[in-house]
Every structure is written in C-alpha cells, then in structure tokens.
Amino acid sequence: MNKIKISPSILSADFSQLGNEIKKLEQAGADLIHVDVMDGHFVPNLTIGPTVIKALRHYSTLPFDVHLMISPVHKYIKDYADAGANIITVHPEATENILNSINHIRVFNKKVGVSLNPDTKLDVIIDYLDQIDLVLIMSVFPGFGGQKFMPEVIEKINELSKIKKEKNYNFDIEVDG
Ligand code: ZN
C-alpha cells in the first residue's frame, strides 16, 4: 500500500494570515498544501486566484496542490502554472475537452490532477488514467467547506483503486471533502 499523504485545504485557514497559516501547516507535517480555487460560477463560492497563490509561494516549499473549481478552466491553466502550482487539478465538468486540458497542464511541466464530482462517473476519465498523476474524488459537492462526507463515493474509490492495481497505473487517489 502507498503512503497516505495529508493535503490540508487552506479553505479552513484564517485568510488574513494565509502566509503564516501555510507555514504552520508545513511545521505540522502536511505533505502538500491543497488550494481550493472557486469562481462563483462553476461553484457558488468565490475564493482566491493566481495572484494570491503567487504571493503565498514564498511561505512554503511544500507542493501546492491547486484544485481549480472554475469554468471554463482551460484558458486559466497557464496562470496557475505561472503562479507556482505543482499539481493542477481540473474538473472534466468544467472543460470542453478533458484530454486537451490534461495535455495543456503537461506543457507547463506540472502534475496533472483530475477531479470528479460525486455524480460524475469514472468513465469520463477511464481512457486517460495513464496520463493522470492524481485523481481527486469529491466526497461532497464542491463549493462549500464543512459538508458531510458522502459514503456513496467509497464504491467509486474502490473501483478506481482496483483499476489502478490491475493496469499498474501510477496516479495517486485523493479524496476531497
Ligand atoms: Zn479541493
């Protein structure tokens, strides 16, 4: 079994102290920093964009695991790559062509993440799993902090982990929510 990594979301942090909060997460032993980017359109809430991520970059050497909940996402990938994201995660629900977006993230030498909403089936990414570094399974509907874990998604996680083993794929499985 692979090591379990912890990627705390800065969504729960004190936004007036983000830099220090990230430092604290690093000191507390986090493996990655999960940054939830929301646009008020793909999801109802609005959070932070590339300018803030760039400013935060100096506060930690941990990889920034940037979860883009924005639509259309494709044209903004470059901005997040430039801002210092290490993993860029996109939703197939938010792009016209998920394969194009996967390839676009690679152009910037970033790790490719794909996130699936609770009601999105694995089928939409099944043909591309060999090109993905991280599958982020939403166990809540994206857009709000503090929701309850949806136990139905455990089946999806099990199926994904089975495919990973069978085909010997390398992606990490991350659960959000
Ligand atoms: Zn997230």
Image (tube, rainbow, N blue to C red):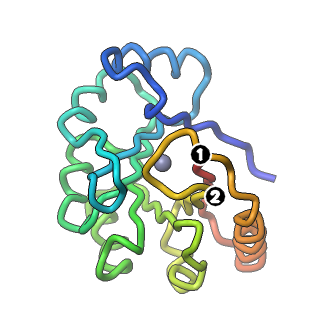
- Residue 120 x, y percent position in the rendering: 55, 75
Image point 23% across, 32% down: which residue? 52
Going from the N terminus, do you reach mark 2 or mark 1 first? 1
Question: Whole-Å distance between the Cαs marked 2 and 1?
Answer: 20 Å
Q: How many labels does the image show?
A: 2
Which element carries disc 1, helix, strand or loop?
A: loop
Image point 52% across, 21% down: which residue? 25
Choose top left, top right, bottom left or bottom right for residue 4.
top right
Q: Which mark is residue 139?
A: none
Q: Which of 30 and 167 is in front in this view?
A: 30
- Residue 42 x, y percent position in the rendering: 32, 62
Q: Which amino acid does label 2 sit on?
A: Ile
Q: Which amino acid does label 1 sit on?
A: Gln
Residue neighbourhood size for the residue with mark 1, other residues' Cα within 10 Å, grouped as few (<14), some (14–19), many (≥20)? few
Marks 2 and 1: which is nearer the front?
1
Q: Are marks 2 and 1 in contact (CB under 8 Å)?
A: no
- Residue 86 x, y percent position in the rendering: 38, 46
Residue with the most extreme right position: 1
- Residue 163 x, y percent position in the rendering: 72, 77
Would you name the residue on which mark 1 appears?
A: 147
Choose top left, top right, bottom left or bottom right for residue 104.
bottom left
Image point 81% across, 53% down: which residue? 1
Image point 48% across, 29% down: which residue? 12
Residue neighbourhood size for the residue with mark 2, other residues' Cα within 10 Å, grouped as few (<14), some (14–19), many (≥20)? many
Q: Nearer the viewer, residue 24 or 112?
A: 24
Instruction: Work out whether 117 lies above or below 2.
Output: below
Instruction: Work out whether 78 lies above or below 95.
Output: above
Q: Residue 173 carries which label?
A: 2
